[in-house]
């Protein structure tokens, strides 16, 4: 697969990764004998992409992704996510050649807890105006990769989503 396809078809890539992620998570929950509902937001203007519900726990999730080895060092997060029950950010890392999910980066709290503080670093628009100025996006905060916890497997991620005090 040409590297340019990851950039040229980034929206399609994001959809396929979401399908793969949800498929893996559904299989894990099925193995555990736990039913899970998935609601998908048509837009992410409310700060989340999907809502996951299992065991009476509702998680509003903003999904992010990058391939293993990418130089991506930060992610932009909508502050409205902090207003949602048990909000969290899941950063999916994948193999660019096979699309296999490699691991997950987690930013969130225990079920029922508020989203940890997003900090004060305000995001900017990715495109500049005619004068080269990139305007601030007051509803966006920037999280550095170091603020995320690495979760190596989908099983451990399911624990973080739906179990109190996961290890």
Image: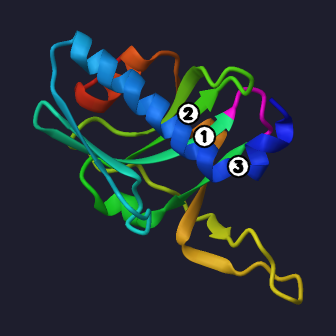
Where is residue 48 drawn, in percent x and y? Answer: 39, 56
| Label 2 sits on residue | 92
Is 21 placed left or right of 69 in the picture? left
Q: Nearer the viewer, residue 146 or 18?
A: 18
Left or right: 5 as drawn, with respect to 17? right
Name the N-terminal-most of marks 3 and 1: 3
Q: Is residue 159 left or right of residue 57?
A: right
Q: Quadrant of residue 131?
A: bottom right
Is residue 30 in sight in this rendering?
A: yes
Q: Residue at x 12, y 30 (%)?
A: 55
Spatial CA distance of label 2 from label 1 is 5 Å
- Magenta span of residues: 67-71
Badge 2 vs badge 1, beta-carbon distance below 8 Å: yes
Q: Secondary structure at mark 2?
A: strand
Q: Which residue is mark 3?
A: 9
20 vs 59: above or below: above
Q: Neighbour class for label 3 at 10 Å: few (<14), some, many (≥20)?
A: few
Q: Is residue 70 shown in magenta?
A: yes
Q: Position of residue 22 (x, y in %)?
A: 39, 32
Cα separation between marks 2 and 3? 17 Å
Tell me which secondary structure the magenta stretch mostly adopts. loop
């Amino acid at each position: 697969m040409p590297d340019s396809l990851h950039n040229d078809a980034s929206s399609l890539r994001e959809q396929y990764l979401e399908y793969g992620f949800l498929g893996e998570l559904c299989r894990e929950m099925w193995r555990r004998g736990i039913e899970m509902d998935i609601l998908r937001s048509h837009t992410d203007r409310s700060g989340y992409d999907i809502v996951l519900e299992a065991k009476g726990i509702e998680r509003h999730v903003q999904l992010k992704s990058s391939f293993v080895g990418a130089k991506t060092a930060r992610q932009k997060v909508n502050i409205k996510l902090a207003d949602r029950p048990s909000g969290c950010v899941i950063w999916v890392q994948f193999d660019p050649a096979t699309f296999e999910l490699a691991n997950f980066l987690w930013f969130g709290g225990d079920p029922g807890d508020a989203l940890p503080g997003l900090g004060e670093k305000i995001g900017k628009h990715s495109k500049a105006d005619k004068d080269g100025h990139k305007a601030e996006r007051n509803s966006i905060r920037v999280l550095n990769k170091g603020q995320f916890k690495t979760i190596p497997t989908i099983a451990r991620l399911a624990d973080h989503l739906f179990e109190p005090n996961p290890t």
